[in-house]
């Protein structure tokens, strides 16, 4: 009996993940507000009624995609903040982590970038809540040092918001550079198959260099904030 229940539960989870994957795939080309339930179930190959065994509506699926896209990042961010010694190592670790995440999960990053200010309120709120958790975690890490330097809780949180906003902006910049890879590949595949990789790598390097410089400016401002 328990084996049967376990099989059913595994199948249910498999179908749920298939619906999430289908929704994310369809959202590559459109916003959540324009995506229909039947489009998602048709891609998965299940009846529309099966959708409601997993999600209340399309907004609920969108919130689940937010959790999938951002939830796993908390562990990575905490590790960067805890393990890096000094501003320069933290800057390098942050930019490298953002670049790796965009390369690994471009569809998730694109979904967050589009829906952060999109037309589905529960999804906007879910994204804001997850980003707020990032701010809390960054602020807690900074507080260990900055409270001793006389920083107020409000100023520490303001600094944390700057860092999180910068991470989001950098992720979007890396994502915008990604299409260059396919465009260059189409144009030069017959002449130089490696041209797309070189062009994309060069674009990513420029974005990473800019992101590191911007974080250094924030860091310098932080060091002299109390002087002001």
Image (spheres, grey):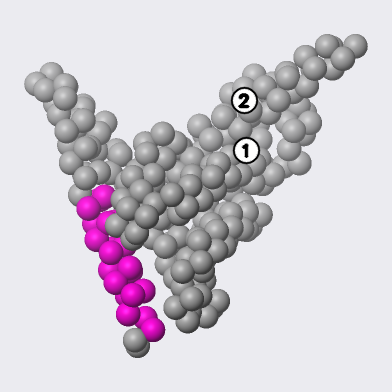
Q: Quadrant of the C terminus?
A: bottom left
What is the number of callouts on the image? 2
Q: Is residue 227 magenta?
A: no
Q: At 71% from the left edge and 25% from the top edge, which residue is drawn?
A: 13
Horizontal arrangement in the rendering, residue 216 relative to residue 61 (left or right): left
Using the image as rendered, state which of residue 168 and residue 53 is in the foreground. Answer: 168
Q: Secondary structure at mark 1?
A: loop
Which numbered circle lies on residue 195?
none
> Magenta region: which residues?
207-226
Looking at this view, name the residue that lies furthest to the bottom.
Answer: 228
| Residue 222 seen in render | yes
Q: CA distance from mark 1 to mark 2?
A: 16 Å
> What kind of secondary structure does the magenta stretch mostly adopt?
helix
* Up/down of 220 relative to 168, above or below: below
Q: Residues within 10 Å of mark 2 (few under 14, many from 20)?
A: some
Horizontal arrangement in the rendering, residue 174 relative to residue 43 (left or right): left
Give the image location of residue 84, x and y in percent. 39, 52
- The answer to whether the residue labelled 1 contacts the one labelled 2, judged by CB atoms less than 8 Å apart, is no
Q: Residues within 10 Å of mark 1 (few under 14, many from 20)?
A: few
Q: Residue tagged by mark 2?
A: 18
Q: Earlier in the sequence, mark 1 or mark 2?
A: 2
Using the image as rendered, state which of residue 128 and residue 164 is in the foreground. Answer: 164
Q: Secondary structure at mark 2?
A: helix
Q: Residue tagged by mark 1?
A: 36
Give the image location of residue 10, x and y in percent. 73, 19
């Amino acid at each position: 009996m328990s084996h049967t229940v376990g099989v059913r539960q595994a199948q249910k989870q498999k179908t749920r993940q298939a619906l999430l994957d289908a929704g994310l795939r369809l959202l590559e080309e459109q916003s959540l507000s324009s995506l229909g339930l039947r489009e998602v179930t048709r891609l998965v190959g299940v009846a529309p009624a099966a959708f409601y065994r997993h999600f209340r509506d399309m907004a609920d699926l969108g919130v689940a995609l937010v959790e999938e896209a951002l939830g796993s990042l908390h562990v990575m961010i905490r590790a960067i903040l805890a393990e890096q010694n000094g501003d320069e190592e933290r800057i390098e670790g942050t930019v490298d982590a953002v670049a790796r995440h965009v390369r690994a999960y471009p569809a998730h990053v694109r979904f967050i970038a589009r829906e952060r200010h999109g037309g589905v309120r529960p999804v906007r709120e879910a994204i804001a809540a997850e980003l707020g958790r990032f701010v809390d975690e960054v602020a807690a890490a900074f507080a260990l040092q900055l409270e001793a330097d006389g920083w107020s809780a409000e100023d520490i949180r303001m600094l944390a918001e700057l860092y999180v906003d910068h991470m989001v902006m950098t992720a979007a910049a890396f994502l915008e550079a990604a299409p260059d890879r396919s465009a260059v590949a189409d144009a030069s595949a017959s002449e130089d198959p490696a041209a797309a990789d070189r062009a994309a790598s060069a674009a990513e390097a420029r974005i990473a260099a800019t992101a590191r410089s911007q974080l250094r400016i924030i860091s310098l401002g932080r060091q002299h904030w109390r002087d002001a």
